[in-house]
Image (cartoon, helix red, strand yellow):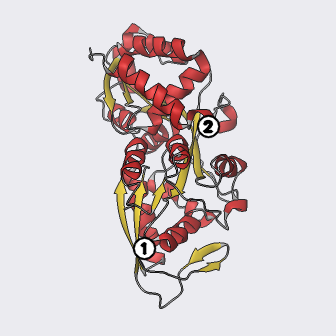
Amino acid sequence: MKTLKYALIGGAAFLPAGAMAAELNLICSADVVICEKLVSEFEASHSDIDVNMVRLSSGEAYAKVRAEGRNPQTDLWWGGTGDPHLQAAHDGLTAEYKSPMLDKLQDWAQGQAKTSDYHTVGVYSGALGWGYNKDIFAEKGIKAPECWSDLLDPALKGEIQIADPNSSGTAYTTLATLVQIMGEDEAFDFLKKMHANVSQYTKSGSAPVKAAARGETGLGIVFQHDAVAQAVEGFPIEVGSPCEGTGYEIGSMSMIEGAQNEESAKVFYDWVLTPEVQNMMPEAGSFQIPSNASATPPKEAPDLSKIKLIDYDFAEYGSAERRKELLSRWDEEIGSLPLQ
């Protein structure tokens, strides 16, 4: 294992000139375009660190980190919903780290760090909702949904896609949101009824709205910024926000306990929290709210102040016990059902 010295410049860490080449093994749980943008920009400004990146959804990332617990092969996990990051912290899989950038972050990002005893931190935020294909809805005479309850409309039979909450943080956030809005038994009753309208449970959280954009399905339940990204690309996608209220994510970042390349991980960690880096994200189609208070939210980003957000309990629904209970019940009562 190489031991590298790094200096703080403008509040962020950078390797000095002449340092030995190092490696960083990174899991990225955002869209692959965003992941590739981050790696490209980081390697351009840190030529003495080579990044080995793998793109995994939040649930897959947690499973990989857990499987490697005794012999970590990953140094840093960036992006994806905060719940599995909190579970990894609870399980002792991630390391405590207080970045020098911490006090430059939004309150909600710092709150995520405090909740985890500084084993994770918020990097972006976004509200849950859906994106639907306006052309398909018009052609089939389907009324645009305004509330969660509207997703039970028989006209939507076979027109809804949502990810599997075992692999997708987006879908787990949906599950936890519905439980908090409706109550657990009522939420599972709702999901059983909605199942009649579901054509596919995808692995990736953003896949459903991409399918809607391509005309393969009518509606995808996703984070609203993922629907915005498809609309910005020119697809006939309209963004929806449920009237009953909705949950939101705090996309997070965690350094792995026992990381082989800890110093490289700290360099990336500090760098990605700077406003300069977060301001680049819309170039990769990322329209989340950035965590650095000095960063500029994308003009296309949904205005969270105009969305009815619930008081999402990250501590409870990010705990290992609660996640396991809800996912086990989903597997038994929803995942086991045949698709229509």
Query: In terms of image quadrants, where is residue 96?
Result: bottom right
- For disc 1, the marked residue is 43
How far across and how far down the image is residue 3, in percent? Answer: 48, 81
Percent x, y for residue 109?
65, 50
Query: Which quarter of the rendered picture does the C terminus lie within?
Result: top left
Residue 279 visible in the picture: no
Q: In the displayed orientation, state which residue is furthest to the bottom.
A: 18
Q: What is the secondary structure assignment of the residue under circle 1? A: helix
Quarter of the figure with the N terminus: bottom left
Return the residue nearer the eye: 2 or 190.
2
Total marks shown come to 2
Foreground residue among 258 and 317: 258
As drawn, which residue projects farthest toward the top?
Answer: 154
Closer to the eye: label 2 or 1: 2
What residue is drawn where x is 58% and y is 16%? Answer: 183
Give the residue type that dot 2 points to.
Phe
- Residue at numbered disc 2: 314
Rate crowding at label 2 as few (under 14), some (14 to 19) or many (20 or more) other CA atoms within 10 Å: many
Q: Residue at x 52, y 13 (%)?
A: 185
Query: Which of marks 1 and 2 precedes in the sequence?
Result: 1
Q: Mark 1 Cα within 10 Å, few/some/many (few <14, many 20+)?
A: some
Q: Residue 8 at x, y = what percent?
A: 64, 78
Amino acid carrying label 1: it is Glu
Q: Is residue 334 left or right of residue 92?
A: left
Q: Secondary structure at mark 2?
A: helix
307 or 340: nearer the viewer: 340
Q: Is residue 226 above or below residue 147?
A: below
Report whether residue 25 is seen: yes
Q: Can you give x and y, in whole percent of width and height, for residue 137 in the image? A: 39, 20
Residue 107 appears left or right of 218: right
Give the Cα separation between the discs numbered 2 and 1: 33 Å
